[in-house]
Amino acid sequence: MRKRVFGKKLNRPRRSRVALFRSQARALILHGRIKTTKAKAQALRPELERLMTLVKKGELSSQRAALARLGNDKEAVNLLFSKYTELVRSRNSGFVKIQLLAQRRGDAAEMVEISWVNFEDKDENVSNKTKRS
């Protein structure tokens, strides 16, 4: 039985794993999408879902809990509670999507791109339009 087993260990000690989740969550909040391995993305998804439920509550205590989860990164928390509130209003769960990419050349690890469901990169759209013209 898997009682009280949280998820994947990712071959890391607890503190290193927590630091990995924090840094990847921060990067996703700040940039909107990140490329990582499939195992890391699947382990990160529940953490991001918990953060988005805190955003859905929108209370001061929720902001403080998110601040604690992200390692006191005020910039990321402010961005999370300002930019992604419209995403949380439109859905109850499933805020993150994982798209498969090509395998990594060095060790053939399965690579994925993890991003928000309704994320649109403004700069990327502009650069694609200029390339086509």
Image (spheres, rainbow, N blue to C red):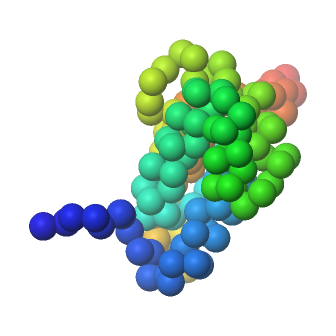
Residue 3: x %, y % from top left: 21, 64
Quadrant of the image occupied by residue 18? bottom right
Specify whether residue 32 is in view. no
Given the current orientation, which residue lies at the most extreme top position?
A: 90
Task: Classify residue 75 as left or right of residue 52.
Answer: right
Q: Residue at x 50, y 41 (%)?
A: 49
Vertical relation: 67 (above or below) 4: above
Q: In the rendered view of the protein, which quadrant contains the C terminus?
A: top right
Q: Nearer the viewer, residue 88 or 65?
A: 65
- Give 7 or 72, whichever is nearer the viewer: 72
Rendering coords of residue 2 (x, y %): 19, 66
Residue 8: image x %, image y %? 38, 68
The answer to which image quadrant residue 19 occupies is bottom right
**Residue furthest toward the left?**
1
From the viewer's perspective, is 87 left or right of 96? right
Q: Along the horizontal axis of the image, is 91 left or right of 70?
A: left
- Where 79 falls versus 109 (above or below)? above
> Horizontally, is 51 left or right of 40 in the view?
right
Q: Which residue is nearer to you in this view: 99 or 81?
A: 81
In the orientation shown, which residue stands out farthest toward the front? 61
Q: Is residue 26 above or below residue 56?
A: below
90, above or below 72, in the image: above
The residue sitting at 78% across, 46% down in the picture is 76
Instruction: Estimate the x, y position of residue 85 in percent, counting from the top left.
Output: 67, 24
Could you tell me how many numbered marks the image carries? 0
Residue at x 36% of width, y 64% of height = 7
Q: Residue shown at 85%/46% (left/top)?
A: 75
